[in-house]
Amino acid sequence: MLEELFMPQSEAVSEKRFILPAGQFQRLFDALHQRGYQTIAPTLLDDAIVYEPVDSVSELPIGLTDEQRAGAYRVKRNPEGRTFFRYTVGPRSWKRYLYPPRQRLWQAERNGDGRFHVLAEQEDVPRYAFIGVRACELSAIQIQDRVFLSEQYQDEHYRLRRENALLIAVNCTAPSGVCFCTSLGTGPRVRDSFDLALTEVFGNNEHFFLVEVGTERGASLVEELGLPVAADQQCQMAEALIDSAEQRILKRLDTSDLKELLYRNLDSPHWEEVAKRCLTCSNCTMVCPTCFCHTVEDVTNLQGTVAERWRQWDSCFHVDFSYIHGSAVRISEASRYRQWITHKLASWQDQFGVIGCVGCGRCITWCPVGIDITEEVRALRRREGSRAAPASPKEENHANA
Amino acid sequence: MTRVTKPKLAVWKFASCDGCQLSLLDCEEELLEVAGALEIAYFPEASRAVVRGPYDISLVEGSITTPHDAERIHQVRRVSRFLITIGACATAGGIQALRNFKDVQEFIRAVYASPQYIETLSKSTPIRDHVFVDYELRGCPINKYQLLEVINAYLNGRKPNIAPHSVCSECKRRGIVCVMVANGTPCLGPVTHAGCGAICPSYRRGCYGCFGPKETPNPAALSKRWKQLGMKEEDLVRAYRSFNAYSEAFRRESESHERS
Ligand code: SF4
Ligand code: SF4
């Protein structure tokens, strides 16, 4: 089962925390390479911090931070100094590696006798070590596990990548203006389903990572590196940084009654209002770490002797996405935005047992016109409030059904 | 599967720069394969040999700008089973449709020494305005892989894999960082039809809209954002008024900024 496979909560795993001096960070990368992992980590590329293959700590976004708000993202110098992880999430998520944007699923060849045979895809997938996975992203990966590795349906392509992936998490200490993980209980502190978790402590001539161990794999790395056990005071320094981060997260999504709110509002005039602003460009879905929708395309060679089936990221904002026998179902822009937000926040719960949003804020930042999922929910609540009798003027009155 | 007779392909030119039909010659490696699967029956740009029609596939490049061409396109339609228009000229009127916003007689008087010999229409219009079109391939110029895909799909009796959604989807799949969000650079990508593979954003430039409007475009919302980024009304007019100026969505949007 899922939990057993990917979220081992072994009792043997140490409760102790360890210290990795920042100057020795490269040793962790080297140890991973020795074990045959390809290390994927944040790096600066085209004015954004994105996840790419990174072999050396010198390629990390050293001394950089980010500023994010609806529709705008900027990388800035971090006045603190040469930190490694004082920024939040960028336009790419780890799904790019676990669930690539475009991949071949299988091929078929026509035989001489006019029939064809299918050639299964032989995938040579690297063993990934993801370095710098944030708390919200761990939650997003768990959500995609539910999608691709349910008991009923298993996606082999995802499994191949996910099974071997080693997750080195990082606690957030510099949240951005679009983060709202605290509303969803997904961050900023990582809680489980990591191999190792780091908290970067910087300042007063100190620069080290506090290391928590989540799995046997993680423990053996700590052992190999011979990391010293952390002192209480060092643990407290790290805790204080995360606490402070938590307090600086101001954006909120009120999740009470959320599913019912959206289901009640399928016919709200609000969708038409969003449609005036929405470009139906699909950026929000492409950057979302939980969005998993795709399409399959069949391609052939000119002679028609070889066919291939490819899967690629698709979006509920594309008209063709809802094409069913002769016509698309969701033609209007309003119906497409409604579909996205209703699936993410409401029907996802019926389908997978969790809300489909982890509060990473990507869809807010990378929407070219700055449409904000939390604001749209607020607007829906406001509209309901204004329609309600004057006796119930407050949002809180929409209690759970 | 062996085909008894090869389908015949014809390539026709109307008012255009030839760039789109050159995409076919640009196929180089694949061209031999195409020539193996199809009989290139009429393609004056490539060969003087002409095989008589009717033709199974006609690729039509260019817009209609003269009374003569307005007649000729009907002949082309009559001899073609499948008529596929290629490029911004054939699908939207092209850059020459800038005349549609002005008085063409004035241009003629200004440009030609003997204007009385010039016979031209007041507007440059897409092929679809004149005859029934089976398929449209966008771009200025078209993407040669999309051209191959349409031919391939025709030969194999399947639907071409050509998406009408935004350029943004191509950027995101390629992992290109959004120039508008990360740099504040105005980009037409969110209202532009995919197909080029997001060439300009990959060089950190905003999209110029070569492939014309995407499905259900919302240029008004995009323009609003551009204004916040500091763009002036007259620049908005110019942004929408290029190769696809006369496409419905871009034309309306440019006009709305001209009036205000
Ligand atoms: S819906 Fe938006 S905030 Fe929520 S997980 Fe997706 S991208 Fe992040
Ligand atoms: S909400 Fe924003 S990112 Fe999403 S489709 Fe609409 S305009 Fe594009």
Image: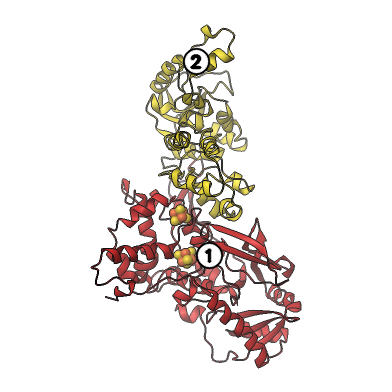
Q: Position of residue A271 (x, y in %)?
A: 34, 55
Tell me the crowding category of disc 2: few under 14, some 14 to 19, or many 20 or more residues within 10 angstroms, Cα based.
some
Mark in front: 1 vs 2: 2
Q: Quadrant of the N terminus of chain A?
A: bottom left
Label 1 sits on a secondary structure element that is: helix
Q: Which residue, as the protein is rendered here, is positioned at the far front?
A: A390
Q: Position of residue A73 (x, y in %)?
A: 58, 59
Q: Output the chain of dot 2.
A: B
Left or right, residue B74 beside residue A61? left
The alpha-carbon separation of the residues under discs 1 and 2 comes to 58 Å
Both marks 1 and 2 on one chain:
no
The answer, for residue A317, to whether it is visible in the render is: yes
Chain assigned yellow? B
Q: Quadrant of residue A244?
A: bottom right
Tell me the crowding category of disc 1: few under 14, some 14 to 19, or many 20 or more residues within 10 angstroms, Cα based.
many
Q: Position of residue A80 (x, y in %)?
A: 70, 72
In the drawing, what numbered circle is on residue A95?
1
In the drawing, what numbered circle is on residue A380?
none
Front in this rendered view, residue B207 or A193: B207
Give above or below for A310 relative to A14: above
* Figure colour of chain A: red
Q: Quadrant of residue A230?
A: bottom right
In the drawing, what numbered circle is on residue B105?
2
Q: Position of residue A110 (x, y in %)?
A: 47, 48
Q: Output the chain of dot 1.
A: A
Q: Quadrant of the C terminus of chain A?
A: bottom left
Residue depicted at x 54% and y 79%: A190
